[in-house]
Amino acid sequence: MKVLVVGGTGVISTALTRLLVARGANVTLFNRGRTGPTVRGVRQVTGDRDDREAFVAAFANETFDVVYDMICLSPEQAEDTARAFRGRCQQLVLCSSAVVYGSRLPPHVLVDETQPLEPVSPYGHAKLACERTLEQAAASGAFWLTIARAGHTYGPGGPMDDQLGNDGTWDRVARGLPVLVAGDGLGLWQSTHRDDCAAFFAYAGLNPRTFGQTYNAVRDETFTWREYYREVARALDTRAKVIFVPRGWLLAQSPERFSFLDEISGHHGAYSSAKARAHVPEFQPRIGLEAGARETFADLRARGAWPDGTTDQQYERLVDRAISLGLPSEEA
Ligand SMILES: NC(=O)c1ccc[n+]([C@@H]2O[C@H](COP(=O)([O-])OP(=O)(O)OC[C@H]3O[C@@H](n4cnc5c(N)ncnc54)[C@H](OP(=O)(O)O)[C@@H]3O)[C@@H](O)[C@H]2O)c1
């Protein structure tokens, strides 16, 4: 195998070069000769790829089975590589980066039940103590224990939470007024409709597979906070005007008021329900956030419990301050 490595003496490409040599490949490296040392047994071609024409010309009379471009960092460099090796190699391997994914994470980046338990809030410590206490009872033969861990669960009878635990947020959204989101709105969040969550509990009952087991009873669909505000605002047939404010700034204003943010919603909240769905086949969360929010809003109105978002002077002052500071905003 005749191989060219563009780079070849860097962190990754040194290891690559070693492995290629070990495979018995005929290896050529192209680099400036500054970073080293070059792996023994390879041919070194010295040059700077930023000298574009020289780079393209450097291998004009050669062909390779494989060319690895380990240091392609711009479209211009990619063009040079394409020009240099078109018809001159069977395979071109580009070293790219996971940075291409940006900040959007797929739905399967989820915490399962094997995750270490490290609560950060008094609520979390208390719930863990409950689990431990009942586990001890179960261990001594008191019963089969099934632990079902709910995530954020909403629906008729309760509020439609926002990230800050602020009652009036959705009224403000409905009125076209700006609302606050902590951080950059890219934290992860799940919300499970109470009917879906309850289905797990219901069908876990007397299901022997669940005896002695622990589950996340959540809907796996995962949102960034930006997406969450967008979906819930859809249930109000509008868009949410969100202002991104530092989490610490909010907590400094009022730790008590923003305790939900401090204890829960300021962290990623993305959990896997795979085990729950496997052991309890009837548990198949199906209620999407927009539909669930519509139902919850209708219930709040029907109950006369719709919060008025315009009477909260403290929140209004925070919004004004965030605007005057020029903090970033967007229509989610
Ligand atoms: N490390 C990570 O965590 C990570 C994560 C994701 C993706 N990546 C990707 O990994 C690649 C980097 O690989 P690496 O670790 O082997 O690289 P590296 O450690 O940055 O080494 C750079 C290599 O390229 C050569 N080079 C640099 N500038 C050059 C130029 N103008 N002309 C010719 N040769 C040049 C260097 O040799 P000389 O200085 O002697 O010329 C050296 O061999 C990048 O594509 C990056 O996007 C890295």
Image (cartoon, grey):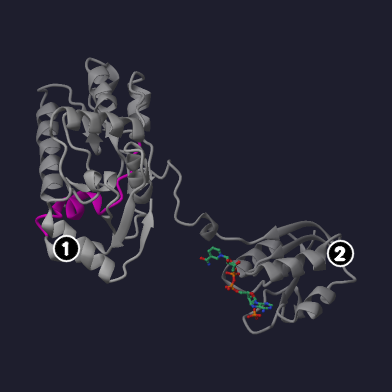
Question: Which residue is nearer to you in this view: 202 or 290?
Answer: 290
Residue 141 lies left or right of residue 205; in this view the side is left
Residue range of the region highlighted in magenta in the rendering: 255-272
Alpha carbons under labels 2 and 1: distance apart? 68 Å
Main SS of residues in magenta: loop
Q: Is residue 41 left or right of residue 61?
A: left
Instruction: Establish if 31 lies above or below 218.
Output: below
Image point (29%, 20%), residue name: 209
Location of residue 218 with respect to 204 vertically, above or below: below
Kind of residue at disc 1: Arg
Kind of residue indicated by mark 2: Thr
**Where is residue 28 drawn, in percent x and y?**
77, 71
Question: 193 or 123, which lies in front?
Answer: 193
- Examine the rendering and report whether any part of residue 5 can be seen: yes
Q: Position of residue 19 (x, y in %)?
A: 66, 62
Most extreme residue toward the right is 61
Disc 2, disc 1: CB below 8 Å? no
Residue depicted at 10% across the width and 49% down the height: 122
Residue 317 has which mark? 1
Up the image or down, 267 lies above or below 289; here it is below
- Which percent across, then down, holds residue 138? 13, 27
**Closer-to-camera residue (61/250):** 250
